[in-house]
Image (tube, grey):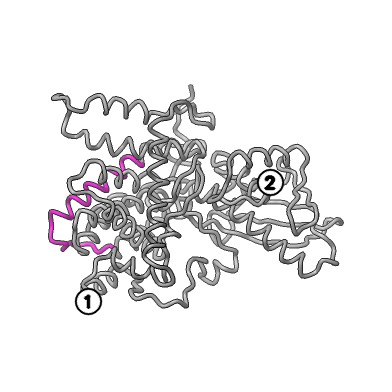
Amino acid sequence: MFLSIFDIFKIGVGPSSSHTMGPMLASARFLDALRERWARAPDAPAPLRIEAVLRGSLAFTGQGHATDRAVVLGLLGFRPDTLDPDEAVRREAALRANAWIDIAGLPRIRFDAETGIVFDYGPPLPGHANGMILRAFDAEGVPYFTETYYSIGGGFVLTAEELAGGDIKAVDASVLRPYPFGSAAEMLVMGAASRRSIAAMKRANETVGRGDAELDAGLDRIWAVMDACIDRGLATEGTLPGGLNVRRRARRIHQALLSERGSNSVQPHVANDWLSVYAMAINEENAGGGCVVTAPTNGAAGVVPAVIRYYRDHCIGANHAGVRDFLLTAAAIGGLIKTNASISGAEVGCQGEVGSAAAMAAAGFCAALGGTNEQVENAAEIALEHHLGLTCDPIRGLVQVPCIERNGLGAIKAVAAASLALRGDGSHIMPLDNCIEAMKQTGRDMSVRYKETSTGGLAVNLPEC
């Protein structure tokens, strides 16, 4: 199965790819399906009211992740990658005031944002922990159209039928790719046979149907959004929304780091602080609902960009070609994890989010520094191995504590893993494929309390102030 780099790295909005971007896309897809159904039979009873039911993790942590607002914006026709924040605020306010949706190609539909979104705290839907049901009713209250959607991580959304058929709606599977590796083992074999790096094989797969110039423009746009997000986070102060009163720290830490440059008193481990501050800057932006790139999720959006920024600004011999190879390599590893296990915190815990991000960043960093394919695979395995069992237990369902600092530690582990791999010859005991399978099994056995429901771990051990 082929996952494009543009499926792994999606431009969107915070605070969550699964709980914000996914429900927004699902609601927009429902609107499209409703429009298509109405166009086929305009003389039939019209859809006049919509209801959304959130289940599983979407219900338990939906308010902290702004899932209800995401549903509203999706039903207004907004999508994460093209969202205009000012227009979204204006149209959301109008909907909340009059409870009507006016969308071209459909009759006027009633939707009360206060009562039309149901947080169902019962058992999750059978397909995935992040499930939601959207229903349209006619004037008599008879169901007109119903669809079940699953937000399976990283902004991927599937209907129940698509999920049952294994269709992740990514890239046309009928298109032949020159290096169709579905596992790390296949990736290494193909690399050895072709004498190509992982980045070169990924580039060859991506340029089927598009030229190198188009691919490079897309890569550069991804990095530009990541880089700008770091800069915004480093320049912004204040308190994050949600009620935890978490203060942004990235700007203050960054200013302190800048003031210490050139000083004889700087400790050698200051590199860790640079990595942390870059990651924290992005995740503070994400927590504030800003524009971020899934890498591979919003909750883990800071790890890969932090390591790229560290490579670009702190490493000898860094160049823009290295940034592109970093992204291509990271996407190859992310695609393997997504295909063979999961990147969803609601499905396997944070090992699938920050753990996957650290593996991607370690691989990308190792490749950018000239590592062999075997060293790159080793770097990814080391980083993922040492995140196994990591739970997802956000306090109050907010992507703030422990998520912001956790991205910083993920970036540090990624660099350490790549450095260890580069010191070796690529040989190691545990293959990446087996580590990915171990993560999948660990997630399957993990209690649901530790899988983004905020019903266990740190989420229930916050002291009362």
The answer to whether residue 373 is left or right of residue 284 is: left
Please tell me whether residue 171 belongs to the stretch shown in magenta.
no
> What is the CA distance from the residue labelled 2 to the residue labelled 1?
54 Å
Residue 17 seen in this snapshot: yes
* Residue 272 in which image quadrant: top left
Q: Residues within 10 Å of mark 2 (few under 14, many from 20)?
A: many
Which residue does the image show at 77% across and 64% down from the upper left? 38
Q: Residues within 10 Å of mark 1 (few under 14, many from 20)?
A: few
Mark 1 — residue?
Answer: 193
- Which residues lie in the magenta part? 407-432
By secondary structure, the bulk of the magenta-drawn segment is best described as: helix
Q: Which mark is residue 70?
A: none
* Residue 268 in which image quadrant: top left
Q: Which mark is residue 117?
A: 2
Q: Position of residue 445 (x, y in %)?
A: 41, 56
Mark 1: which amino acid? Ala
Which residue does the image show at 40% across and 57% down from the upper left? 217
Which residue does the image show at 17% across and 45% down from the upper left? 316
Please tell me whether residue 420 belongs to the stretch shown in magenta.
yes
Mark 2: which amino acid? Ile
